[in-house]
Image (cartoon, rainbow, N blue to C red):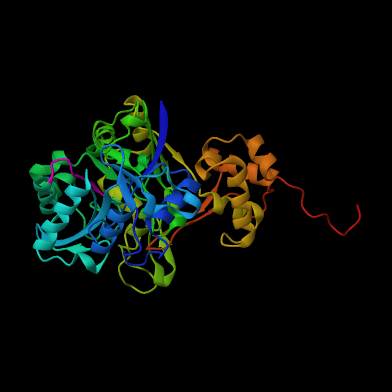
């Protein structure tokens, strides 16, 4: 058996607020460093990006692509990275008396299918060149209908399902169930993306999702964010790693092959709690009830976050969710913190500093990819390759002994591996005072 790490939701340089470095060769190189084996192309409806895909990628296994000669990265690196044709689309349309704004993951089994799909949308006068994630005046169901008309093998997975503004269950413009959104086509929705602000436990609290596969992806807007969430699957051999097999594993929740998801700590997500960023006010769902959903500082409505929305729809407590998951052998998960954030805390410096960059590169060169270091390297290996405090920091992340300041209203939470007064596994600088 061989294991693969998959990140099925990213963007290109043609999406709004995305890095110009998001080109296929650079994505492949970043995936190699991170330890991602299969990554979505992102943005395949954008004409220039689709042309870039055509120029850079060659089909390998059925429905998976790899870099060709024109797509080689620096010194030929990154050639092992495989790509799957996936994008995110925004649909905005009044439905059932309310304007719905939903982001949806869309996957195509081949370049021919993607091209046919793009042509269908262009013929409907949608401006696909406007953005890598274009806005379509359609309902979620109508978009799914179009996909299935183009190719039955196309797959839709609602993106970051709980986020307030564009999640299918979001508090601002989402639905109260998949059935409400997709009606008779609901059986075609066999998975949702949990998003950075929710984890599987939160989703397990709602019995309506018991038969829905939970996937996790980065929604990366820059190479540095690739793999911040991901999926770990195993296959019999390389020949079995195909578009069809990946989608079958997800659809059937094949627990022998879908090993686990890699998750943010959801508190770090930027919509975990309720709040109002302009006023720097944040609160939990119980406090929101007390304030009747109004910011006590400016008297404007609070942005209702993911935890509150989960509480609203859930029919189980967290403890009940854990019991159900164990009883039914739900696909497990592993919470992680990106290695640069761990290093910054261990070294007591900023995450974007040269010290962190140098230490990161040195560790990768000595031990392998970031995911290998975070998931598989022994603490002894990590200490020998770096320092005691870095090994201690990674061990704390693996066991969940961290401190998180929750995110809210578009503001990411912050993770601290060590409390302010805690030792980082190294001697403190000695005092000038004599004993």
Magenta span covers which residues?
151-158
Q: Nearer the viewer, residue 277 or 329?
A: 329
How many labels sit on residues?
0
Residue 272 visible = no
**Residue that sits furthest to the right in the current view:** 434
Q: Is residue 370 above or below residue 14?
A: above
Indicate yes or no whether the magenta region holds residue 253: no
Residue furthest front as drawn = 69
Q: Nearer the viewer, residue 325 or 247?
A: 247
Left or right: 318 as drawn, with respect to 145: right
* Image quadrant in which you'd find residue 52: bottom left
Q: Residue at x 22, y 67 (%)?
A: 129
Q: Say if 392 sits above or below 280 in the image.
A: above
Identify the residue at image location x=35%, y=63%. Answer: 13
Closest to the observer: 431 or 108?
108
Image quadrant occupied by the N terminus: top left
Residue 205 placement, left or right of 370: left
Q: Position of residue 235 (x, y in %)?
A: 36, 29
**Residue 45 locus on image (x, y percent):** 22, 58
Residue 227, image x, y percentages: 43, 48
């Amino acid at each position: 058996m061989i294991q693969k790490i998959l990140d099925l939701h990213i963007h290109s340089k043609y999406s709004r607020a995305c890095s110009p470095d998001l080109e296929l060769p650079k994505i492949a190189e970043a995936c190699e460093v991170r330890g991602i084996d299969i990554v979505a192309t992102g943005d395949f409806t954008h004409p220039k990006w689709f042309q870039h895909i055509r120029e850079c990628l060659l089909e390998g296994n059925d429905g998976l692509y790899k870099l060709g000669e024109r797509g080689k990265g620096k010194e030929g690196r990154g050639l092992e990275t495989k790509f799957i044709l996936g994008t995110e689309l925004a649909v905005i349309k009044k439905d059932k008396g309310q304007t719905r704004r939903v982001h949806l993951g869309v996957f195509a089994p081949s370049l021919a299918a993607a091209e046919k799909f793009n042509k269908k949308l262009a013929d409907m006068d949608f401006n696909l060149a406007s953005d890598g994630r274009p806005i379509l005046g359609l309902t979620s169901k109508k978009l799914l209908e179009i996909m299935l008309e183009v190719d039955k093998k196309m797959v839709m997975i609602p993106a970051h399902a709980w986020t307030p503004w564009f999640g299918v269950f979001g508090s601002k413009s989402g639905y109260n169930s998949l059935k409400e959104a997709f009606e008779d086509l609901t059986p075609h929705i066999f998975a949702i993306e949990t998003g950075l602000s929710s984890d599987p436990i939160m989703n397990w609290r709602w019995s309506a999702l018991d038969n829905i596969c939970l996937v996790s992806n980065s929604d990366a807007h820059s190479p540095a964010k690739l793999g911040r969430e991901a999926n770990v699957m195993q296959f019999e051999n390389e020949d079995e790693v195909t578009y069809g097999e990946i989608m079958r594993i997800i659809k059937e929740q094949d627990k022998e092959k879908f090993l686990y998801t890699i998750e943010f700590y959801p508190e770090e997500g930027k919509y975990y709690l309720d709040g109002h960023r302009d006023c720097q006010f944040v609160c939990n769902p119980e406090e929101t009830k007390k304030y009747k959903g109004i910011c006590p500082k400016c008297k404007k409505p609070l942005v209702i976050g993911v935890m509150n929305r989960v509480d609203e729809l859930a029919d189980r407590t967290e403890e009940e969710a854990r019991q159900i998951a164990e009883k039914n052998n739900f696909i497990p998960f592993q919470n992680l913190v990106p290695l640069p954030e761990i290093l910054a805390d261990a070294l007591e410096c900023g995450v974007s500093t040269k010290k962190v960059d140098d230490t990161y590169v040195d560790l990768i060169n000595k031990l392998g990819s970031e995911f290998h270091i975070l998931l598989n390297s022994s603490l002894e290996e990590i200490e020998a390759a770096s320092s005691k405090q870095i090994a201690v920091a990674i061990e704390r992340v693996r066991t969940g002994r961290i401190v998180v300041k929750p995110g809210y209203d578009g503001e990411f939470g912050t993770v601290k591996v060590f409390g302010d007064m805690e030792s980082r596994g190294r001697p403190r600088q000695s005092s000038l005072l004599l004993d």
